[in-house]
Image (cartoon, rainbow, N blue to C red):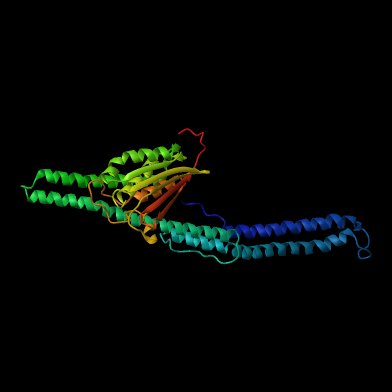
């Protein structure tokens, strides 16, 4: 944005300091005149030098007062210029850092030294903002690279299948169509997951009263056929846990957690426990399963996109795109909640979601 040139903040402060000194000097001279000269007799017609009189004092005091006022004005300008430069030096550092950030250099930090004041507080806030931006952009770049790789895989498989079919006209068309259908379904699932993750990151949804216990029951009913095929029991316990948010996104959050627990549950024939409760002003959802032991360092990466706790499951019932827990994390953050993942000593994972609760009188 182009602006008309104007006075710098330093010059404005210097003029302000000089003006303040000039006004203070004028007030001082006024006080001297009012409370001193007014009581001196006006003896301008008498003999000068015999006794003090107003004429004598005015003609001797006025030139000295004018010189003092000029000195105060000059001293105010010079001193104000130097003081303003010293006071605004931290602002210059912040401006330089902002210009560097504007060119894409987010690794630069001000790290202003000295005691705490308004400029140091602004500097620390700016450094913190740069750190968050750098981390966010790095995460987005990593996510874009992973998403491109994941989307490229089904497209490459489809192209390979079509090339083989074109080179071998005798190939079974039904088998080709079936394989293309599976690959296409995976690409659609991945695209929908990416869109859902983006929607959760933006947080632009309508909030309404939602009961997590009802969502847990709905998710368990939806995933019951998958659990039965794996001979896993879904155990939904607890009471009402009311919160406010998007019912669609929260249902996807619960469904992803339960599906993840079912798919990675070992051994077959085990139990996945889904528990909901209201804990004071917080609504809590816990999903627990048995599985392979997970080290803490692996658990810490599970909410990142395209990270998996175990090897990818390559079955028709669950291909897995590596975005389940990333979507859960995104939805929880969009609803101002927290997500805790704790590996069980015997294997498996305990996932706890805490969301802001609402009074029981809210309609859901």
Judge by depth and name the residue closer to the eye, 5 or 17: 17
Q: Quadrant of residue 117?
A: bottom right
Residue at (87% x, 55% y) in the render: 38
User: Which residue is rendered at x = 42% and y = 40% of the image?
Assistant: 212
Q: Is residue 339 visible?
A: yes
Write the residue at 23% across / 49% down.
315
Q: Kindly indicate the quadrant of the structure image that contains residue 143.
A: bottom left
Drawn side of residue 117 relative to residue 266, left or right: right
Compared across the picture, whether 74 is left or right of 110 comes to right
Out of 92 and 242, give the one closest to the viewer: 242
| Number of marks present in the image shown | 0
Residue 334, x across and y down, in percent: 43, 46
Left of 140 or right of it: where is 152?
left
Where residue 288 sits in the image (x, y, percent)? 38, 49
Q: Is residue 11 left or right of residue 211?
A: right
* Residue 67 pos. (x, y %): 75, 64
The C terminus - image quarter: top left
Q: Is residue 201 visible?
A: no
Q: On the image, which quarter does residue 218 sit in? A: top left
The residue lying furthest to the front in this view is 269
Q: In the image, residue 248 lies at what x, y percent?
A: 38, 39
Q: Is residue 162 above or below residue 77?
A: above
Viewer-nearest residue: 196 or 92: 196
């Amino acid at each position: 944005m182009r602006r008309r040139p104007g006075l710098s903040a330093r010059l404005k402060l210097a003029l302000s300091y000089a003006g303040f000194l000039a006004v203070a000097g004028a007030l001082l001279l006024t006080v001297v005149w009012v409370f001193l000269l007014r009581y001196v007799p006006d003896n301008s017609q008498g003999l000068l030098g015999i006794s003090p009189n107003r004429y004598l004092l005015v003609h001797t005091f006025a030139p000295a007062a004018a010189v003092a006022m000029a000195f105060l004005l000059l001293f105010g300008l010079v001193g104000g210029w130097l003081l303003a430069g010293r006071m605004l030096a931290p602002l210059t550092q912040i401006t330089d850092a902002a210009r560097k950030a504007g060119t894409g250099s987010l690794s630069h930090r001000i790290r202003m030294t000295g005691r705490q004041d308004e400029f140091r507080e602004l500097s620390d806030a700016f450094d913190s903002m740069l750190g968050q931006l750098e981390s966010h952009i790095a995460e987005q770049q990593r996510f874009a690279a992973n998403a491109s790789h994941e989307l490229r895989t089904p497209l490459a498989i489809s192209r390979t299948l079509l090339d083989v079919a074109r080179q071998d006209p005798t190939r079974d068309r039904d088998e080709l169509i079936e394989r293309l259908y599976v690959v296409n379904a995976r690409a659609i699932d991945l695209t929908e997951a990416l869109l859902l993750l983006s929607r959760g990151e933006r947080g632009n949804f309508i909030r309404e009263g939602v009961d997590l216990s009802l969502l847990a029951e709905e998710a368990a009913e939806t995933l019951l056929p998958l659990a039965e095929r794996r001979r896993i029991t879904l155990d939904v316990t607890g009471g009402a846990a009311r919160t406010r948010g998007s019912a669609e996104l929260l249902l996807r959050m619960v469904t992803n957690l339960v599906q993840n627990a079912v798919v990675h549950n070992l051994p077959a024939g085990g139990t996945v426990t889904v528990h909901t409760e209201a804990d004071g002003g917080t609504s809590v959802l816990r999903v627990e399963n048995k599985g392979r032991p997970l080290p803490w360092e692996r658990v810490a990466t599970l909410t990142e996109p395209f990270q998996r706790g175990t090897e990818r499951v390559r079955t028709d019932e669950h291909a897995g795109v590596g975005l389940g827990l990333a979507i859960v994390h995104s939805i929880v953050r969009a609803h101002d909640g927290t997500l805790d993942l704790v590996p069980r000593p015997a294997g498996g994972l305990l996932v706890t979601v805490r969301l802001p609760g609402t009074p029981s009188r809210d309609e859901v």
